[in-house]
Amino acid sequence: MTRKELIEQIRIKQSFLCVGLDTDLSKIPPHLLETEDPIFEFNKAIIDATKDFAVAYKPNIAFYECYGPKGWESLKKTIDYIPKNIFTIADAKRGDIGNTSTYYAKTFFEYLNCDSVTVAPYMGEDSVTPFLEFDNKWVILLALTSNKGANDFQFTKDADGEELYKKVLRKSCEWGSDENLMFVVGATRAEGIGEVRKMVPNHFFLVPGVGAQGGSLEDVANYGWNKDCGLLVNSSRGIIYASNGRDFAEKAAVEAEKLQQDMAKIILEKGL
């Protein structure tokens, strides 16, 4: 999917919602466990219920690959089922040198046909650029995360006083452009979103942490908005586990629509 196509979907749906498909067999409604492929049946119902409100879906690959070949089959069926006008994110956090990254990229861009994949930047340029060689595909690079361990490395300063996450942002912009490179920026670091936006004014951000993790949608928009919206705000647990009964899909739709309506107000206020 191109940047232009993504922005058009945001305008059409008046939404910048990404639904995280972190599908956990221990949390899905018990009646689905009786089906041949419980993970896919759950995902299928969630997609059907939320596709009018979401512009992106983000399966977390760990929740699938832990089941071996059957998990990969569920993942492939899920990706294939997502409507083609909705942006797909393989949340895999891959990143290795040379041919290894190339084959990771082939997995997610060719075999699964995802629009994007999350990538860890720690190993530098030659671990990231192989992912950037595919047409109309995106790298979503980890930049500023919200987890406790983020403080271990991301805010350390070099001899010139530059924090590591800022160096990642500055350097990675030499590898890709705002047409194929996004950044992960955690919602619970609202002011940090503003710092990242100053450095990369035109790039899209994938923002996890809104909803169950306590991030504020309003703060994310205030600090992270750009002329094209520039945001994909992810909600996982708050939507997909709104209920564990037979009404799980209906409850998911209610929660997704609430977020979409809040986003529509922001889009109207911002004049997109």
Image (spheres, helix red, strand yellow):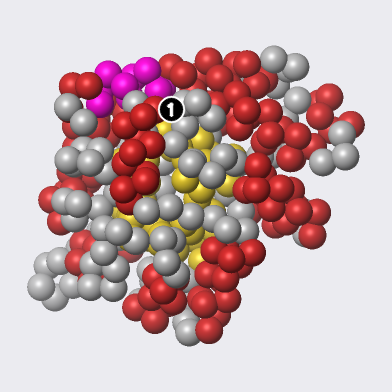
Apparent side of residue 36 relative to residue 132 in the rendered image (left or right): right
Residue at the spot 88% in from the left edge and 39% down from the top edge: 36
Residue at the spot 31% in from the left edge and 22% down from the top edge: 264
Q: Quadrant of the C terminus?
A: top left
Q: Which residues are magenta?
A: 259-267
Q: Does the rendering let one see residue 58?
A: no
Q: Amino acid at mark 1?
A: Gly
Q: Quadrant for residue 177, please give it.
A: bottom left
Secondary structure mostly seen in the magenta stretch: helix
Q: Which residue is mark 1?
A: 211
Question: Where residue 32 sits: x, y (%)?
Answer: 81, 29
At label 1, counting other C-alpha atoms closer than 10 Å, the crowd grade (few under 14, some 14-19, many 20 or more) is: some
Question: Where residue 13 sits: x, y (%)?
Answer: 39, 28
Q: Does the rendering let one see residue 260?
A: yes
Residue at the spot 19% in from the left edge and 52% down from the top edge: 202
Question: Where residue 128 sits: x, y (%)?
Answer: 40, 73
